[in-house]
Amino acid sequence: MAEPTLAEKLEILADGAKYDVSCASSGSSRKGKGGIGNAAQCGICHSWTADGRCVSLLKILLTNVCIYDCAYCVNRRSNDIRRVMLTPAEVAELTIGFYRRNAIEGLFLSTGVIRNPDYTMELLIEATRQLREEYRFNGYIHVKVVPGADLALVERLGRHADRVSINMELPSRESLALLAPDKSRESIVGPMKRVGELIVQTREERKVSRKMPPFAPAGQSTQLIVGASGETDLQIISLAAGLYGRLSLKRVYYSAFISVNRDERLPAVVGTPPLAREHRLYQADWLMRYYGFAAGELLDEERPNLDLSLDPKAGWALRNLHLFPVEVNRADYEALLRVPGIGVRSAQRIVLARRGSHLSLDDLPRLGVVMKRARYFITARGRFAADLTPDAAGLRLRLTEKPLRRERWSQPSLFDGGAGMDIRSTITGEL
Amino acid sequence: MILRYDGTFAGFLTAVALARERGVEPEAIIDQQPEQQALFAAVEEVATDRQRAAAFYGLLRRTLTPGALHTFRLAFRAAEPGKELLLFHFLQLGVVVGQQLDGMLAHERVVPVWKLARAVGREAHRYKGLVRFQHLDGDIWYAAIEPEHRILPLVAPHFADRFADQRWIIHDPRRGEAIIFDPSRRTWTDAELEVTGPLQLSNGERLFRDLWQRYFDRLAIEERRNPELQRQHLPLKHRRHLPEFDR
Ligand code: SF4
């Protein structure tokens, strides 16, 4: 077969990387300091694809060659597909070319495993090194760590990257053994721990001396495939809570399983992937990260799966009606946050606005409160906005999102919002 | 009384300062021809007075919080008929209550200005991603955008930081305005600009245009296809100057 052109390689390697959902380019802020580029604290979308997902990074594989054979993956060894590889120089050149046109916010570089994990890591390091050192590129770089790689290489890679991630993919040891037999839980968690240590350590060192090169300043993330194996939402959410808590990951992404291989170990998926479930998981995740909910408040052994017709915050409120209604002029910020229909921004605005005046029901919509949902859970100046106080069953009916339009099942939260940022609720799953 | 100013920020500040000095409430502050019925009222031309504008701006800086000032500056960029009077009332209130203005989010004089500011701020943020440069012969990076609001000066600092080593132009052809960045001096300037002939693209530009289009086509996941969602995020009006939609 003829040597592939750069364009052909780009097409094939974009194809191989597109299932990875972590595309946010945020959480890192860097001024241009000579050379080219900077990083914006909140994500910037540059375009949207035909499936409605935001394009912010050049998301490609270095190579789709792979010595491993994961059941769910297009690039697995046993698939008969055309294999190509970009040189590190080509990766850098493409990134800079698109960046200068302002088509992207930076690079997201993933890869198959070529020869062995360490060899692959050397190539990734070289690509990012060229960008940082030769092009003096200050834009965003997110790069994958190859499971099983030498920890010294992990450290070198993270010195060039804004964010690193190691995909867990499967929520349990058993599923991993079944579907990704070449990757052990240890080969994933080991580097994850090391990355976590280095992030913390470097942050401390940089407080003392700015000369110390940063290490993955935007933190690390991982991805879990949902629906390829039998775990419950409770298992998934608890795992995520552990990753946030113990390993201080910045983000966990959930990816509805899409069947790309014929494989009897995988569930038969007909029609669209479980996007509704993915969406609810993002909402639950959001509640844990920004609203102070614990996994156990959202799900328990008796109800181990998220309700597909009710958002998880409304579900929690219905199980805790004794805590409502709350008076918006008095309730503390944390209690406001837990009201369905009040998001982070509206809660902040309420707290701010009530310093100036005693809020009435009419003021609330102007502060961004979604009264359709909130009316059953709040009072303002002692007044209740709902016509009646239905019981839990009646309320549930009113809060159910009846046939949700398909476009609502979008991957939420393409921005890692920090407090006070303009987090766009339509795509963030903010409740 | 109707005040007419030249459409600039300094001009508007002059007009507001003038009205305050005289203690009058203008019926309107406009930057265009007055409409027919308004002709019966007296229209007074305000000559932009930079010194007076700067003095008044200084007063605002001492009186308002940075947040309120920012809101005001953003809202001024809105393409909204009648925005000037809204801003006038906002400032009147602000000068009286000072720092308290921040807490008055639900006040009738604050709400409309704040809404405008949000719309403008959001559009400016969007355009950080939607400005798409083309590399022209002569090593100039050119981008055309057609935003609803006049956001050029709002996005300029972002691109000045990001592309500090490129000679770039961002052009709003509908308004005939542009900002031009000079990397040797690391500053940008406003300019009037009209593009008459076809752009002279560099050789590399064609290659990268092709690469980008091919890349973009590969990104969508078939099983997740959802053109409505795409349209919701990226309305057709935004696509004109994006190479991935222009074939
Ligand atoms: S290691 Fe990665 S690229 Fe290789 S088969 Fe597994 S998931 Fe695919």
Image (tube, coloured by chain):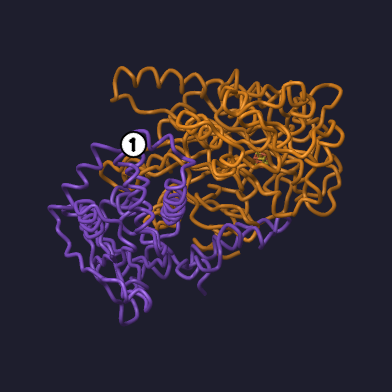
Chain colours: A orange, B purple
Q: Is residue A174 left or right of residue B20?
A: right
Which sits in the foreground, A324 or A219? Answer: A324
Q: Is residue A180 left or right of residue B170?
A: right
Which sits in the foreground, A238 or A1? Answer: A238
Circle 1 sits on which residue?
Answer: B97
Q: Is residue A101 left or right of residue B179?
A: right
Give the image location of residue B47, x and y in percent: 16, 65
**What residue is at 85 percent from the left and 52 percent from the top?**
A270
Give the position of the C terminus of chain A as an image quadrant. Answer: top right
**Looking at this rendering, what residue extends furthest in the left direction?**
B51
Give the position of the N terminus of chain A as an image quadrant. Answer: bottom right
**What residue is at 67 percent from the left and 47 percent from the top?**
A75
Give the total of numbered labels. Answer: 1
Give the image location of residue A292, x and y in percent: 62, 24
Within 10 Å of disc 1 (Cα), the crowding (few <14, some 14-19, many 20+) is: some
Query: Does the closest atom of ligand 1 sit within 8 Å of the Cβ of label 1?
Result: no
Q: The numbered mark 1 sits on a residue in which chain?
A: B
Give the image location of residue B1, x and y in percent: 28, 65
- Is A37 drawn above or below residue A300 in the view shown? below
| Residue A176 visible from this viewpoint | yes
Q: Secondary structure at mark 1?
A: helix
Q: Quadrant of residue B232?
A: bottom right
**What residue is at 69 percent from the left and 42 percent from the top?**
A255
Give the image location of residue A389, x and y in percent: 80, 33
- Is B235 drawn above or below residue A284 in the view shown? below
Q: Quadrant of residue B13?
A: bottom left
Ligand 1 - quadrant of the structure image: top right
Q: Name the residue type under label 1.
A: Val
| Residue A191 visible from this viewpoint | no
Which sits in the foreground, B75 or A78? Answer: B75
Which sits in the foreground, B220 or B43? Answer: B43
